[in-house]
Image (cartoon, rainbow, N blue to C red):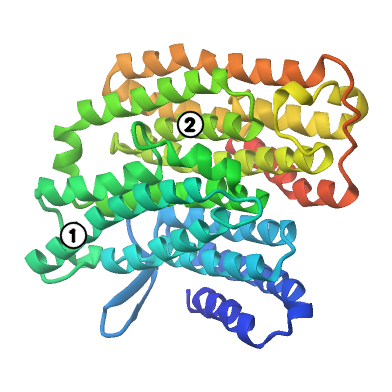
């Protein structure tokens, strides 16, 4: 744990001392170092028990960091995704922004203190706000949406965190214990619902994806959305299980509404980034509901789904970014016949689209089966409902692939060798996890 934390601070320190000409090379090399510390953490963490491992405390217990089953998987995913993000960007300011986002997101995943979690996680969203609101290609309107949705929910979370601090004397989840304060539980759930996101507070995500750079969409879909699931597992389920049990029908209706609205919205989109973004919202609705069943299968299925979605969805955003770089458009109306002009790009797009709709032998399929098993244990109607409307994923995926494959040739260039080698780790990881889960 200490090695991982020191590596994060070393990356921040390198921004001040490394010459600008060598900054990207040094940042990419330093981004690979946490992978070795993660391997040692896998050996030292008991993933089969509900215990925290490698707990580190600073400032007389004020800042406490540790790992459990849920956070270990997502931290491993984030450490794997961040080097890919750094290879996708070129500007010095963008490199510095992504290094700061990496450090803040990993610290939020490791944090065992509510107030520290709020500080580091909201800090990453401030940097993301600046990336999306950049002058040339960004949108200040999309940046304002992030500010309004995330900062308002974060303020509710901060108020509830101080309420926990004043009522129990600590905001450390290792010392709080199980309580029945529904007001505090509702504040925590409000933050996680916005970050997941769930309808009706989901409108910030599609706009953020459209105007974010490709690396920004990758980090947003691959890591930042998963922080909400880890937060539910760490801060909501162990401390406020009675709140989840009492309001589970309302929570399930919220997840169902989010799943249906996002799936139907996907059918109407012609922007490739919005299609992938709305499909991510529908997937996160399944993950959230499975996680809040508070069963072993639900927690395990939600974490596996987070890892699977964190591999497939970023790959789709990278492919959309390649299409945009080659054609200067993300609209389906102007991209036709790529199976003839760019067969490798078309094959990769078909591969990850099948993974996105939970095709067998993909990790998404295994994760969705486990989530459905958890829903069957709660009530059969929940599982049947998701099975029925999951057919919408097949519809919009088939429509997208059909529009891209057919029609007049658009002379779309093939992906370059650099583009292929950037996305190759995601292909290999998807195959390995799909076979490994089986």
Q: Is residue 106 left or right of residue 25?
A: left
Q: Is residue 58 left or right of residue 262?
A: left
Q: Residue at x 63, y 55 (%)?
A: 81
At mark 1, the secondary structure is: helix
**Vertical position of residue 308 compared to residue 30: above or below:** above
Q: Is residue 19 left or right of residue 226?
A: right
Q: Circle 2 sits on which residue?
A: 283
Q: Nearer the viewer, residue 292 or 315?
A: 315
Q: Nearer the viewer, residue 232 or 400?
A: 400
Q: 10 Å neighbourhood of mark 2: few (<14), some, or many (≥20)?
A: many
Q: Residue at x 58, y 37 (%)?
A: 437
Q: How many marks?
A: 2
Q: Where residue 351 sits in the image (x, y, percent)? A: 73, 30
Quadrant containing the C terminus is: top right
Q: Where residue 50 sits in the image (x, y, percent)? A: 32, 54
- Which labelled disc corresponds to residue 337? none
Query: Would residue 47 be seen by someone viewing this image from the given angle?
Result: no
- Which labelled disc corresponds to residue 159? 1
Is the residue under label 1 in contact with that under label 2 (CB below 8 Å)?
A: no
Q: Nearer the viewer, residue 308 or 273?
A: 273
Q: Where residue 266 sits in the image (x, y, percent)? A: 54, 23
At mark 2, the secondary structure is: helix
**Vertical position of residue 341 compared to residue 405: above or below:** below
Mark sitting earlier along the chain (2/1): 1
Q: Where residue 71 sits in the image (x, y, percent)? A: 43, 56
Q: Residue at x 47, y 57 (%)?
A: 72
């Amino acid at each position: 744990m200490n090695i991982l934390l020191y590596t994060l601070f070393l990356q921040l320190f390198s921004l001040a001392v490394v010459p600008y000409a060598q900054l990207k090379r040094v940042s990419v090399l330093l981004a690979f170092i946490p992978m070795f510390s993660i391997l040692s953490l896998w050996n030292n963490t008991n993933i089969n028990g509900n215990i925290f491992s490698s707990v580190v405390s600073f400032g007389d217990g004020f800042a406490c960091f540790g790992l459990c089953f849920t956070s270990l998987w997502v931290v491993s995913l984030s450490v794997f995704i961040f080097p890919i993000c750094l290879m996708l960007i070129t500007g010095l300011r963008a490199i510095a922004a992504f290094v700061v986002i990496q450090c803040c997101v990993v610290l939020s995943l490791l944090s065992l203190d509510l107030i520290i979690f709020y500080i580091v996680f909201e800090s990453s969203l401030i940097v993301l706000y600046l990336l999306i609101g950049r002058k040339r290609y960004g949108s200040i309107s999309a940046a304002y949406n992030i500010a309004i949705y995330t900062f308002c929910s974060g303020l509710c979370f901060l108020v509830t965190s101080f309420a926990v601090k004043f009522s129990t004397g600590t905001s450390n989840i290792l010392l709080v214990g199980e309580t029945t304060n529904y007001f505090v539980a509702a504040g925590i759930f409000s933050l996680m619902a916005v970050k997941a996101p769930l309808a009706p507070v989901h409108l910030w995500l599609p706009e953020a994806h459209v105007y974010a750079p490709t690396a920004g969409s990758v980090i947003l879909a691959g890591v930042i959305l998963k922080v909400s699931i880890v937060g539910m597992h760490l801060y909501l389920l162990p401390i406020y299980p009675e709140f989840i049990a009492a309001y589970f029908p309302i929570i399930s209706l919220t997840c169902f509404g989010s799943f249906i609205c996002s799936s139907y919205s996907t059918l109407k989109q012609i922007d490739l980034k919005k299609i992938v973004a709305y499909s991510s919202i529908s997937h996160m609705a399944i993950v959230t509901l499975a996680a809040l069943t508070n069963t072993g299968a639900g927690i395990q299925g939600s974490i596996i789904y987070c890892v699977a979605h964190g591999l497939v969805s970023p790959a789709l955003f990278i492919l959309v970014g390649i299409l945009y770089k080659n054609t200067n458009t993300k609209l389906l109306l102007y991209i036709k016949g790529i199976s003839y002009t760019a067969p490798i790009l078309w094959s990769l797009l078909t591969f990850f689209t099948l993974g996105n709709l939970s095709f067998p032998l993909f990790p998404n399929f295994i994760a969705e089966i486990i989530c459905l098993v958890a829903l069957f244990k709660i009530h059969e109607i929940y599982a049947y409902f998701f099975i029925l409307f999951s057919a919408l994923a097949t519809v919009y995926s088939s429509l997208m692939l059909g529009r891209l494959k057919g029609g007049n040739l658009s002379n779309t260039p093939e992906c370059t060798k650099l583009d292929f080698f950037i996305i190759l780790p995601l292909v290999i990881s998807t195959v390995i996890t799909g076979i490994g889960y089986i």
